Amino acid sequence: MSQQQQQQQQQQPPAVQTDQGSNAPQGADASVNRSRREFTPKDNVLKIAVKNLPRTCKTRARIILDTFNNVEIHALGEATPTAVRVAENLQRQGLAEIRKIKTETYTSDQTGGPVDRQGRKKIKIIINLEKKK
């Protein structure tokens, strides 16, 4: 082999073996083609549910910050620790400043549900963040 051919082989990354068959994408393209939905915010409000992971919420909050320069994080009930964690992480990383924290007691207006669920009270937190300059 000539020196040029040896250099070309050294520059090429090794082939990645997958057990998905020969039609599966390999290398860097494999992560791109996964079924991920693109997040395009319509407004600056991020509603957090209990099932949302903090890292997903943080990523979405960063996208909203880049788009609108501020984000309003809303969480209800047991999702409040996730909202606080996201806001603290963004502030700790120097991406945003916490401007306002507002808490409310939310009473659900469920009609026709079980008696013990009518008028159930939950905590609601709203955290306003502004992008650091």
Image: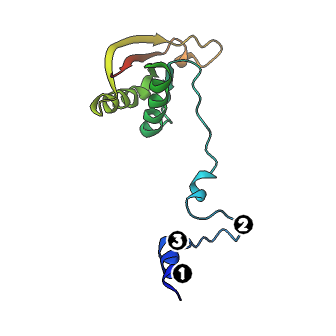
Query: Closer to the N terminus: mark 3 or mark 1?
Result: 1
Residue toward you, 133 or 89: 133
Farthest residue, direction bottom: 1
Query: Residue at the location (42% across, 28% down)?
Result: 78
Q: SS of the residue at dot 1?
A: helix
Q: Residue at x 59, y 51 (%)?
A: 32
Instruction: Bin the neighbour count of mark 1 within 10 Å (Cα to Cα): few under 14, some 14-19, many 20 and up.
Output: few
* Residue 96, x across and y down, in percent: 34, 24
Name which of mark 2 and mark 1 comes first in the sequence: 1
Which of pointers 3 and 2 indicates the residue nearer the eye?
A: 3
SS state under label 2: loop
Q: Quadrant of residue 121?
A: top left
Q: Residue 23's mark?
A: 2
Type of residue at label 3? Gln
Q: Which residue is mark 3?
A: 12
Q: Position of residue 66 (x, y in %)?
A: 46, 26
Q: Is residue 120 above or below residue 36?
A: above
